[in-house]
Image: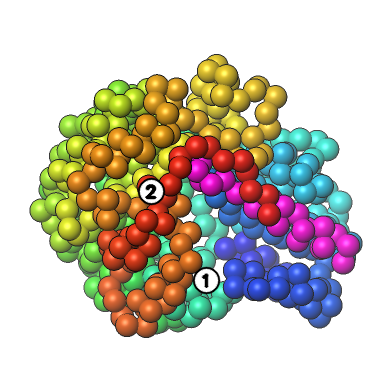
Amino acid sequence: MVAQALFEAGFVVEFIDLCFEKKPLQRISEAIRKFSPDGIGISIRNIDNCDFLSPKSFLFEIKELTDFLKSSTSAPILIGGSGVSIMPLQVLQFLDLDYAVIGEGEVAAVRFFQSVTTGDNGSIPGLISRKEHLSDHNPAQAVINPVVPQIYSWLDTRRYLKLEPVLPVQGKRGCANRCLYCTYNRIEGGNWRLREAASVVEEISIAMRQTGAREFEFVDSIFNQPEGYLETLLEEILRRRLKATFRVSSLSPKGLTKGQVKLMEKAGITSLVVTPETASDVTLAALRKDFTEADINHAAELLSGSSIKALWCFLLGGPKENVNTLAKTIDFVNRHIGKKDSAFITTGIRIYPGTGLHELAIREGVVEESDSLLMPSFYFSPEITPQKARDTLRNGLSDLSRCIFLSDTRSSSLGPLRRMGTLLGLPGPFWRYADYMNRITGSGRIISSDWSPKSVDRK
């Protein structure tokens, strides 16, 4: 999106995707030699793996990259992306850089690199200077998608589609919810900002022609909010008669109706991720969720009677979590996670600056007020130990093979199995095959390991 915005503003743009590069510094060196950039932008998606049981920071690898860039060229560097937006000053200081963008970068990046020649970057919305600190930018007031993303123009989509044949699409930005731990408000703003449904569907249609993709995933913060958004978008898909199927990366249990489920089936949605985080009213209230156990159970009943496959996500160890609240979640999984569904369980919650969880963690002495939180720090309820939580899960869950733990996703077998699944044309999403994967990994799974907190891996 940022590359497209720069291109449309008249810049000559060279885009480098380091995802598959085994020697990224060599690739960067070649690009600098051939392209001689007047400016460099870096997008950082994550600064660590958010894994309480095996934390790893990515910042040291990123610093190798930025240090190499600084030694290779004098071109100004602008960093951005969600990993930067949640703690921009801390990241700038760690990387020893001067400028970052908070929130979306399509407008800010263009104006920043235009200012390289004029020297005036004082009024760029979203720009953060290490010397002058934070801007007064409000992401909620930003323009959503000033350019139509053309992912196929910048990325070799074939490499991604070989891993799993699905492309992302975003229909809106922002989130009006105020969950205790979440950073969406900081990254995208605290209000819903909707694209025109026709524009979203046209983007999908063009991507189908350009890439051959026939499956897309809606990566909005919450797909079924605000009210009416889901219906408007899916009805436009039906009107255009797109021969594609769809996934949803985040659905709230709140207010889900039978009519919405039927409409999703009709429009071609085959799977979705539901994010209740817990099945206990006590912990839901502590997490500032706007729904209840009753909402979760009702949503589960609706989805179980549909053809749509569901991955239910839970955050283990949130505020007020104890043996009784965990038992509620276990009971929900045992009753509602059927053969077509799976449960994804994250242990502990990453603490980010400026969130309600950060304030709670300071009050409870989990972190110091002076802690930058740049290295992974986690909250785990003082009312239950990680080991006790593990034992409760092992003894209580009737089918562990249908449960995916965050550390399970790092198995060395996962990549080859995904490529094989794509080659064989197996229908996605691939988490539907979690039970087979878990049988292969067997006793090596995290549920069979020690759940004592580990030190941060910096390699």
Element on which disc 1 rests: helix
How many numbered callouts? 2
Q: What residue is rendered at 57% in x and 19% in y? A: 365
For the residues labelled 1 and 2, the Cα–Cα distance comes to 41 Å
Q: Is residue 387 visible?
A: yes
Out of 57 and 275, give the one closest to the viewer.
Answer: 57
Out of 421 and 151, give the one closest to the viewer.
Answer: 421
Q: Is residue 179 above or below residue 104?
A: above
Quadrant for the C terminus, please: bottom right
Q: In this rendering, would 64 be left or right of 190?
A: right
Query: Could you tell me if the residues under marks 1 and 2 are in contact, i.e. CB atoms within 8 Å?
Result: no
Q: Is residue 61 magenta?
A: yes
Mark sitting earlier along the chain (1/2)? 1
Q: Is residue 75 above or below residue 357?
A: below
**What's under tag 1, amino acid-wise?**
Ile
Q: Which residue is mark 1?
A: 151
Front disc: 1 or 2: 2
Out of 257 and 306, give the one closest to the viewer.
Answer: 306
Q: Position of residue 202 (x, y in %)?
A: 39, 69
Q: Position of residue 30 (x, y in %)?
A: 79, 78
Q: What residue is rendered at 42% in x and 62% in y? A: 169
- Examine the residues drawn in magenta and state their main secondary structure: helix
Q: Which mark is residue 448?
A: 2
Tell me the magenta residue range: 51-72
Q: Position of residue 281 (x, y in %)?
A: 26, 26
**What's under tag 2, amino acid-wise?**
Ser
> Which quadrant would residue 65 be assigned to in this image?
bottom right
> Which quadrant would residue 298 be assigned to in this image?
top left
Q: Is residue 411 magenta?
A: no
Q: Is residue 197 visible?
A: no
